Image (spheres, grey):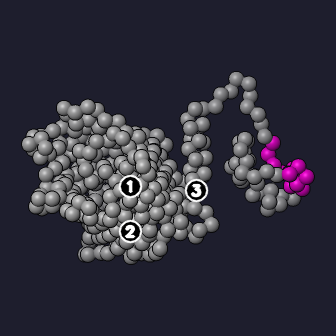
Amino acid sequence: MITPLAMALESEPYLQGNSYPPFAIPDDDPYVQYLPEHTETEPGETRVESETIERSRTWLADYLNRLSGNIDSFFVDSFFSEDIIEDDVKGTRAKLSFYTRRVLGDPVDYKFGISVKLVLPNTNDKLNLLISSEEDDTREADPIESVENVEYSSALRYIINESDQWKTNIDTGIKWGVPPDPFVRFRARRYAYLSEWELKGTQRLFYFTSNGWGEDTSLQMDYPLNTEKLFRINAKAGYQLNDDYFKLSYDAGLYHELSRTSALAYVAGASGDTEQSATFHTYTAGVRYRQLIYSNWVYGEVEPQFLWDRDKDYRTTPVIMFRIESVIAHD
């Protein structure tokens, strides 16, 4: 007679000849007779390298914990993976990236980035551990900022409220440098709909030991053209109390999902400040092409763009960026 336990064991893929069972079964277990026999690798057989890499990725994803919940935003947020610390994808995720950026007339820049959002166990998903490099904060805010001397930060995030209309949390952490820079920041995000537009407003208040108090306000407006195309407008203003002026930026983009493994974006934007008067002094326009290049977690991206900056008398400056990025989460 085949017992239900035996049926469950026979259907368990971990027991089909693999060498890493998820649990140990004692030798005196009455149902051990139903387990398939483990076969050793025959002499001369070699493991396929891609399978080894995939097992390593799966192990790391399981170690980080599985993706808890569905993607709340559009394809562009998940596929382009702008910022996993601030995005609306629930659960544990990690992003590793390496990119090189060349501005005509300047030396080539190289940068390694890391961003981790780890949902801590036994906290009812209320407490997250955050680890990130400065890349996620500076890439969109200042397109010409140097990528050298990368700084990293770590923080604990407490989820105060999370609903369909509101998300609020508070982070406390340290930006690692010499000397270390402790900080605290509060974020409130509101979701709303206006006809066909989906709106997302975010307000942040923060305090860094080195720079003091500050805040930034951002508004994201999405308009889905169809199931494959999305038009997006972003506007942001940030204020640092010690600086006593606002930093301003806005951009617009048309995102096109070409297939399940590739996407294209046409983007343009500007940044400036109110130090003298409300002025925009840096403008960019370019194209982002992103392709899934290995399995479902390694991406390649190329981004050619043109830059017009006040410091270069608004001369047209070509820029090219290449990026390799892995986004690790449970399938």
Residue 33 lies in the magenta stretch: yes
> Which residue occupies 88% across, 54% down?
29
Quick one: SS at disc 1?
loop
Determine crowd level at label 2: few under 14, some 14-19, many 20+ residues with C-alpha closer than 10 A. many
* Distance (Cα) linking label 1 and label 3: 19 Å
Image position, residue 19 (x, y; %): 72, 41
Image position, residue 180 (x, y; %): 44, 51
Residue 88 visible? The answer is no
Quick one: SS at disc 3?
loop
- Measured along the vertical axis of the image, is residue 294 above or below residue 30? above
> Which residue occupies 36% across, 41% down?
149
Q: Nearer the viewer, residue 27 or 158?
A: 158
Q: What residue type is disc 1 on?
A: Asp
Quadrant housing the N terminus:
bottom right
User: Which of pointers 1 and 2 indicates the residue nearer the eye?
Assistant: 2
Residue 138 visible? The answer is yes
Image position, residue 291 (x, y; %): 37, 43
Residue pointed to by mark 2: 187
**N-terminal label among 1 and 2:** 1
**N-terminal label among 1 and 3:** 3
- Measured along the vertical axis of the image, is residue 266 above or below residue 303? below
> Which residue occupies 58% across, 70% down?
124
Q: Which residue ends up furthest to the top in the rendered image? A: 44
Residue 246 lies in the magenta stretch: no
Residue pointed to by mark 3: 65
The residue range painted magenta reads 26-37
Give the side of residue 218 with respect to residue 149, left or right. left
Determine crowd level at label 3: few under 14, some 14-19, many 20+ residues with C-alpha closer than 10 A. some
**N-terminal label among 3 and 2:** 3
Magenta: main secondary structure equals loop
Residue pointed to by mark 1: 83
Q: What residue type is disc 2 on?
A: Arg
